[in-house]
Image (cartoon, rainbow, N blue to C red):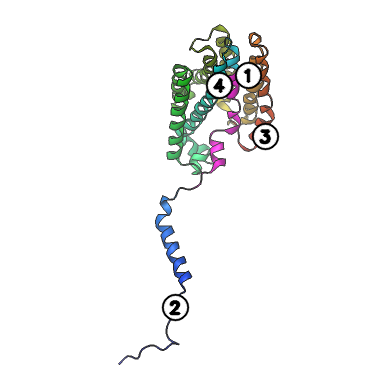
Amino acid sequence: MTQPPTNAERPPRESLRERLRQKAVVAYYMVEDFIPRPPNFAAWLRLVRAPNLLTVPGDILAGFLLAPAATTGDWGQLLLAIPAGLLLYAAGLILNDIFDYAEDLRERPARPLPSGAVSREAAVAVALICLWVAAFLAAFFDALPVALLLILMIILYDAGMKRHPVVGPLLMGGCRAANLLMGATVAADRVWAGPIPLAGALLLGIYIAGVTALARNETHAGTSFPPERIGRLLRMLIPLQALLGVAAIHRFPFNLLALVLLPLLPLHRRLARRFPPS
């Protein structure tokens, strides 16, 4: 007959605290895959090339100032146009990396998507949300046709036309020009804002088309325009936008508001040290 264990042979009883801790650990691992992880904000800032976001508000502001005189309500709508432009630009940069995923795996594995810092599913979702919200905002200031045209050019460029030596730069220049015209639409309350904003859009578009053409070989060894130099050329957009805004002398003294863009220059320079703009 087996003798019951004595007190010395019995295993020590776990405390209530220890049992609760173990159950909590088991429960955590059961639901771990369903717990949303905090986003990697640094990776997202690299994905959208954060310094270049600073060059977007100037498009909208320059177009707004170049258009005919605005009413009081138009100034409020300007506060919708600037976020719309930023969202469209961010969506374009995210889609660019989504379409370039296979190429980046081979040549730029440290980029946020191939490195896994940002999942492709999250990138697609954020890009689509940005496009939808931007179009929604544009509808409030009668710029939906311009926004839809801009979305079409963004998709065409990112989906493969950027590799064409002529069409690619022209599409990128067209995107910048359309962004300026979206700002002009706010003040004019119609898509056609007159010849002056169109001239400004053409100037801005030609500049960006030229920079895009120069950037085609930026990663090649021995190139005359490495990413650092392309980044500086993109930074020069800010004083160009300020100049266009100040040139709108028919809006004096409001045209001087364009000078508020200039403090973005040193901020762009500092951000570019951590988040390459090109």
State yes or no: residue 156 in magenta.
no
Q: Locate residue 83, reporting x and y percent.
A: 53, 27
Mark nearest the camera among 3 and 2 is 2
Q: Is the Cβ of the residue at disc 4 closer than 8 Å to that at disc 1?
A: no
Q: What amino acid is labelled 3 in the image? A: Arg
Of the two numbered discs 4 and 2 on the same chain, state the one appearing first in sequence.
2
Secondary structure type for disc 2: loop
Q: Which residues are magenta?
A: 37-61
Locate residue 37, reporting x and y percent. Answer: 48, 48
As measured in the structure, the alpha-carbon distance from the residue carrying label 4 to the one carrying label 2 is 69 Å
Residue on which the image places disc 2: 13
Which numbered dot is residue 270? 3
Q: Earlier in the sequence, mark 1 or mark 2?
A: 2
Whole-percent x, y for residue 244 in the image:
64, 14
Q: Label the magenta part by its dominant secondary structure.
A: helix
Q: Position of residue 194 (x, y in %)?
A: 54, 7
In this view, the mark in front (4 or 1): 4
Say whether disc 4 or disc 1 marks the residue closer to the N-terminus: 4
- Amino acid marked by disc 1: Gln
Q: Residue extending furthest bottom?
A: 1
Q: Which is more toward the observer, 200 or 210?
A: 200
